[in-house]
Amino acid sequence: MKTYLIAALAGTAIASVAQAQFSETEPNDTRATANGVVGIAPGGTITGVSTASTGTGVDYFRVQTSAAPLGLYRYDMILSGNNGVLHSASLRGTGQTGAAAGAWPLPGGEGTNSATEATLQTGATISGTTSRLNSWYGFGRAGEVYYRVNGTTTTTAGYTATLSRTQITPVQIGSYQPGFISMNWQGQGHSTDTDMWVYDSNFNAIRGYGNDDGNVLGGAAANSLQSYLNRDYLPGIYYIAVTNFNMANSMGSPSDDGFRTGSMNEFADVVMNSSTSTGLNMTFTITDSAGNSLQVANTKAGAFDINWFCFEVVPTPGSAMLLGMGGLVALRRRR
């Protein structure tokens, strides 16, 4: 069994005034029969007993977090077995029926959820413990995930899963002119298999504004596991979510993505990463139609991390506003 060191999270922990406790009820061994966990707040718990990894011994929960002010939050669910017994946990979603390859936009130019259940994230073992960590990001709008707990014939003592929430501050990477703006992870001095999506000022994922694998159909210099996205932007504020493969939200991959069958979450307002890999270079360059270009040195520090950046599109050229983030991001303006 692999054990992963879970890095400390940056941000401010949010205290809860209503820490609801939820107990498992049977049957809840499929997504269709999942127990509803509605409005769970930081500090809230889910308790139950699972004695198998398949069939009726598996426990499914449809977890809906409590609402919070609009913003960017990381949610961590830590599963601990009573008496130190090890369970396993995962976040569940679906596969994706991929769109036909082609330039974007096209009618029906994005993938759709398939009927096949998929594992979006397998809980990581917290170093030195028998606890499991699952993580996702939300925006204060009571997002939902399917959470599954598996046991074995020896896990009769039960388990407790505890939710925490941390507010995240996106890194500011400047202002750019309206029109087409490209974001490029190719040729940036690393070989990380990246995944990304752009969100609007209210943290809504924008249809078609994501990329896993760069493709010449979308304007990339080459077909690659590294992301490339070229899209048209009106004035406003935007956010970029950046991580390594696989990142899952409720949006299907656009037709100009080189990989269009990645697993998806079924609910809006949640995004997650499947990978426990750490220390990954995810440097990228953002360039507008006027030639204003900024290279963003960007590292994935912890398991399941998604790094967030904010930029503004304004009618006139602007200067990048550079903010440090504990060595995570170093910015270099170039023309």
Image (tube, helix red, strand yellow):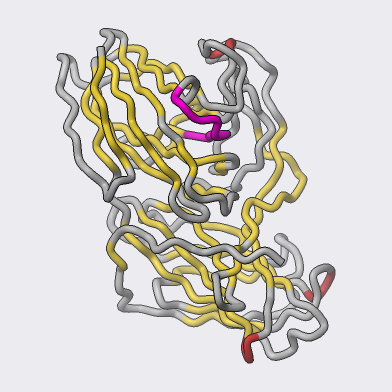
Q: Position of residue 137 (x, y in %)?
A: 44, 53
Q: Tell me: residue 115, above or below residue 292.
A: below
Write the residue at 38% across / 16% down: 232
Q: Is residue 321 left or right of residue 25?
A: left
Q: Quarter of the image holding residue 177? A: top left
Q: Tell me: residue 214, above or below residue 67.
A: above
Q: Position of residue 306 (x, y in %)?
A: 45, 46
Q: Report the magenta residues as a range.
A: 188-196
Write the residue at 33% across / 45% down: 328
Q: Quarter of the image holding residue 157? A: bottom right
Locate the N terminus by quadrant: bottom right
Q: Is residue 130 left or right of residue 73?
A: right
Q: Is residue 191 magenta?
A: yes
Locate the C terminus by quadrant: top left
Write the residue at 79% across / 78% down: 152
Magenta region, mostly helix, strand or loop? Answer: loop
Q: Position of residue 181 (x, y in %)?
A: 36, 17
Q: Nearer the viewer, residue 292 or 67?
A: 292
Write the residue at 45% across / 35% down: 282
